[in-house]
Amino acid sequence: MPDKLPPDVPDGDLSKGRILVVDDEADIRESLETLLDLEGYSVELAQNATEGLRKMESGHYDLVLLDLMMPDRSGMEVLREVRERDSETPIIMITAYGSVEVAVNALKAGASYYFSKPWDNEKLLIEVDQMIARTRLEHENVQLKRALKQRYSFPNIVGRSDRMLRILDMVSQVAPSRATVLITGETGTGKELIAKAIHANSARADQIFVPVNTGSGTPDLLESALFGHVKGSFTGAVASRKGYFETANKGTIFFDEIGTISPETQAKLLRVIQEREFMPVGSSETIRVDVRIIAATNADLRKMVEEGRFREDLYYRLNVININLPPLRERKEDVPRLVEYFFARYCRENEKFLDAESRSLLRFDADAMQLLMDYNWPGNVRELENAVERAVVLASSPSVPADVLPDSILQASGMRIRQDAFGSLPADASLFEMVADFERRKILESLEAVNGSQTGAAERLHIPLSTLNQKIKRLGIDPKRKM
């Protein structure tokens, strides 16, 4: 979960981005407003060039859709004036049919793209989405350069178990090199966090860190995103575009879920690793880059190689240094420290239960903490983070009871049952304690009926033996006890 909104996005604006439409035709403005609004963008309108310039001077926009021909001033004049003070905001020109040559001149003057009327809605939305994503990535990396060393320094990576300390020792050894690193581990174990720690503690820390989600989009789109393309290489490629590799030059590129890339892209990625060069889509010229490659996966790449789904030569190129992150269930001694860390973060974000020095006052009570320690955490650290954030939102006092934990934890772990001296539930027992008490009694009845045989009891209860064993342990049942 991001710590804050993307840079320059006003507080409270939770849209996909702020877009300004500048066009003198009311039908065009309304059409674009409806299209973009349905996609989750925040849209503002300007009915002429003068109003558009005024809005651009007074506010920030993630993208501008600018008509080329307007009665008061031409879009080209507006473009030149904006580019004198703002070289970053994407500007897409909207042209009438037959003015393509003028639009190409606009590209040379600083426009990011152009569409002719009538345009293809799907293509327009794809272009808008990609431009905003790329611009935000560049802005975020400016902030990353300033904060990365502090935020991802080893003292701020939560985890002091022996396994995590060994991993951090390895990261400190690997970071200064340019060696390719493969980070493996289940979903939610913090693979990207470790990748950022490697980058932040390397000689490239002042350069860009580019994360790539290889599982999104088609192979063709991924290839264009990675290597860029030249003008005319495919329909709609009216201008050359840099890819992630060129953007990441001198920095680090991080491939999340590397096992999802197509065989064709695997071959091209292998060439970049081996030769440190690539060809943009549609080009015959190579571009050389100096990029540190870090990849991550929750898949068994070795097995994928054996099944012919992943190139063996690429696997060995990526697996120069392997860092395997343990699941949270194998380092439960880190759970209390992680809970404390996430309480501190979300209490500050929600401005709840803070002392005079803005430190969290929240704590899980003994029952709730025991459930967290007993749980197996299939979603790993990410699942624990969500559980703690939920607790911050729902808590009504500094001592957080088990009742606020997600149902998945309560149902999997059962509930520690409070009982009085006579073995009965107290009057203030929660629903979860009542359910756990009922479950405990039924298990004891079944065990007694089959002379303590857990196999027999599992058959009577119509549940797997392994499930029964887990419940016996979590509910504190003595299988030999008589009711």
Image: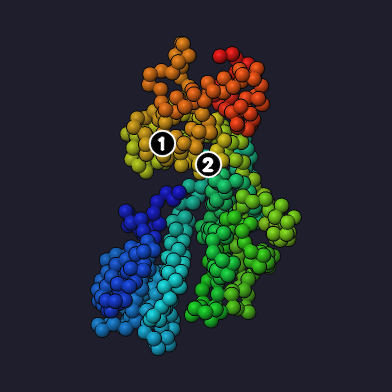
- Judged from the image, the secondary structure of the residue bearing numbered disc 1 is helix
Question: Which picture quadrant has residue 393?
Answer: top left
Whole-angstrom CA distance, mark 2 to mark 1, is 15 Å
Identify which amino acid the numbered label 2 is placed on.
Val
Relative to 67, say whether 351 is above or below.
above
Is 457 left, or right, of 206 in this rendering?
A: right
- Between 96 and 166, the one lying in front of the other is 96
Question: Circle 1 sits on which residue?
Answer: 391
Residue sitting at 58 percent across and 24 percent down? Answer: 472
- Judged from the image, the secondary structure of the residue bearing numbered disc 2 is helix
Q: Residue 431: x and y, percent?
A: 42, 27
Question: Which picture quadrant has residue 267?
Answer: bottom right
Relative to 402, say whether 63 is above or below.
below
- Between 249 and 433, the one lying in front of the other is 433
Residue sitting at 55 percent across and 30 percent down? Answer: 374
Residue sitting at 57 percent across and 51 percent down? Answer: 195
Q: Residue 465: x and y, percent?
A: 64, 30
Residue 381: image tag: 2
- Work out which quarter of the rendered image holds the C terminus and state it: top right
Relative to 71, say whether 374 is above or below.
above
Q: Residue 423: x and y, percent?
A: 48, 14
- Between 111 and 375, the one lying in front of the other is 375
What residue occupies the far top of the structure in this picture?
421
| Mark 2 vs 1, N-terminal side | 2
Identify which amino acid the numbered label 1 is placed on.
Ala
Question: Which picture quadrant has residue 261?
Answer: bottom right
- Say few, some or many: other residues with alpha carbon within 10 Å of mark 1 (under 14 / 14 to 19 / 20 or more): many
Residue sitting at 37 percent across and 36 percent down? Answer: 394
- Between 74 and 443, the one lying in front of the other is 443
